[in-house]
Image (tube, grey):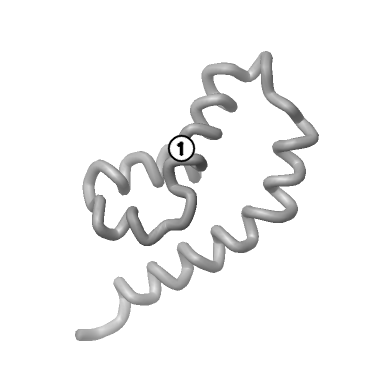
Amino acid sequence: MIGEALNRLAKTDPELAAQVRHLREIVRFRNVLIHGYAAVDHTRVWRIRETELPALREAVAALLSTLDAPD
């Protein structure tokens, strides 16, 4: 879901999407998971889940808070 959402964000708001670190890599990884699932390295998936996902969550939460902030 994250990769798909970021892919759509890149198409609808490239400026905002550019603020997401490693966006292209995340979308590519999503494509491997969805389309190349036979070649998925489960150890890599778990490592990303444990090490990268928390930082991505914080970054997205920060971006969302700027969108919700009054002008």
The answer to whether residue 35 is left or right of residue 67 is right
- Residue 39 lies, in percent from the top left, at 67, 17
Residue shown at the point (25%, 51%) measured from the top left: 14
Residue type at numbered disc 1:
Val
The residue where tag 1 is placed is 27
- Residue 27 lies, in percent from the top left, at 46, 37
Q: Which residue is most to the bottom?
A: 71
The quadrant in which the C terminus is found is bottom left
Residue 24 picture quarter: top left
- In the rendered view, tell whether residue 2 sits above or below residue 38: below
The answer to whether residue 11 is left or right of residue 2 is left
The answer to whether residue 29 is left or right of residue 70 is right
- In the rendered view, tell whether residue 51 sits above or below residue 28: below
Residue shown at the point (29%, 59%) measured from the top left: 16
- Residue 51 lies, in percent from the top left, at 71, 55
- In the rendered view, tell whether residue 52 sits above or below residue 47: below
Q: Which residue is most to the top?
A: 38
Asked which secondary structure carries label 1, the reply is helix
Q: Which residue is most to the right?
A: 43
